Amino acid sequence: MRLLVVDPSPDVREELVALFEENGHSVTVAESAADATRTLAQAEFDVMFTELRLGRSTGMHLLVEARKRWPRLSVVVFTEEATVESAVRAIQSGAFDYLQKPFKPRQVLRVLELVGLQLALVESRAPKRDPADYARTLAADGGYDVLLISPSPPPRETERVSHLPLDPENPSRIRDAVVDFVSPKDRAAVVISAIEELLARHREEEIALLLGEIRACLEGKGPLAVGYDAEKISATGAIAVRASIVAADAHATLGSLSNPIRRLVLRRLAEGPCTFTQAFEAAQLDDTSKIAFHLRKLVESGLVTHSIDQPYRLTSRGKGVIEILGEIDRLDSEQGSGNRIFTVQKAPTTKE
């Protein structure tokens, strides 16, 4: 993880730097609250360890300011004059934990391990892809017009793939370019590479908002794919990117589950691949344009896949949704409305 150590004592800073670097972490130091604030504004960090006594501006003030400006930053505070009141106040102000000096190395590492476990709960396990190859796949297999936003152009030109040089200093230019590209098209997709370059220059909240705006612009037209270098992005930065993408996917999945027509189609697909006509019959509709609309929504949500020479079939995410539907069916409704389905137990026959 990327760590920031804030303490006026050179000895404490050196001790923590040695401890953290020995355990494979990247460490930056600051000797005052002002120095720490400048450092936080210039780079991404996962955890800040700070002394509460920092002279004119206290570590408590730094804690409050850091939690306000960088809410995904975990903060661990420490001091030689620890009291129950100061510990409680630090935790209430957003500190992850509180340590008393002189601390033992294993105590510090244990706190860092707990932070790591918390981050691992939402750690991205995204597969590795080449952005240009993925853009070509979306164009060829998905039939999308694709805007590839990356630091360098793809090695070769591809039909239906346009390139925009990534300008990390100007997120608004990216948003405007996406709007101009997507608006006149019926099917469009956007692939953004090297998102860590944007996160290195702007707050995570700003980049999450940008991705949300791009996703909204693509609504009903196609997907947004975001790539980053795992070795150059902070854990909290990866979480922010993942959250902004997953939120949209979760919304689309819930929309499919809440729609009775799409549930019928999903249940039919659980039995195996089907044609447009078979999906039409399963949905019990009388208008082909309606089933075309719902099938398109299922494909855009990533639950169903389809190509010219292939029938409609469930994706891995679609199969997961079928499992969710099965769990819903198995819910004990007696704990809810009381409505339920049961099979009739026949009364035993009696012999005369």
Image (tube, rainbow, N blue to C red):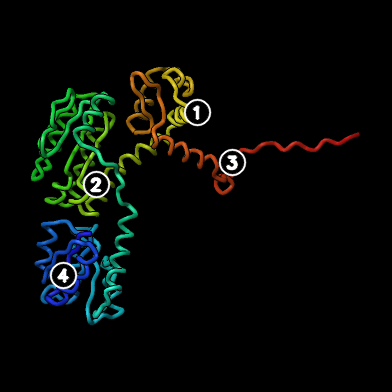
How many numbered dots are placed on residues in this image?
A: 4
Label ID, residue 241 = 2
- The residue lying toward the viewer, choosing from 155 and 168, is 155
Residue at the front extreme, as displayed = 22
**Residue 48, image x, y percentages:** 20, 65
State the CA–CA distance, disc 1 to disc 3: 27 Å
Q: Amino acid at mark 1?
A: Glu
First in sequence: mark 4 vs mark 2: 4
Q: Are marks 3 and 4 in contact (CB under 8 Å)?
A: no
**Residue 31, image x, y percentages:** 11, 71
Horizontally, is 151 left or right of 128 in the view? left
Residue at the bottom extreme, as displayed = 81
Q: Circle 2 — which element?
A: helix
> Dot 4, crowdedness within 10 Å: few (<14), some or many (≥20)?
many
State the CA–CA distance, disc 3 to disc 2: 42 Å
Q: Are marks 1 and 3 in contact (CB under 8 Å)?
A: no
First in sequence: mark 3 vs mark 2: 2
Q: Which of pointers 1 and 3 indicates the residue nearer the eye?
A: 1
Q: Are marks 1 and 2 in contact (CB under 8 Å)?
A: no
State the CA–CA distance, disc 4 to disc 2: 27 Å
First in sequence: mark 4 vs mark 1: 4
Q: Which residue is mark 1?
A: 271
State the CA–CA distance, disc 4 to disc 1: 59 Å
Q: Amino acid at mark 4?
A: Val
Q: Which of pointers 3 and 4 indicates the residue nearer the eye?
A: 4
User: In the picture shown, does residue 26 fall above or below 167?
Assistant: below
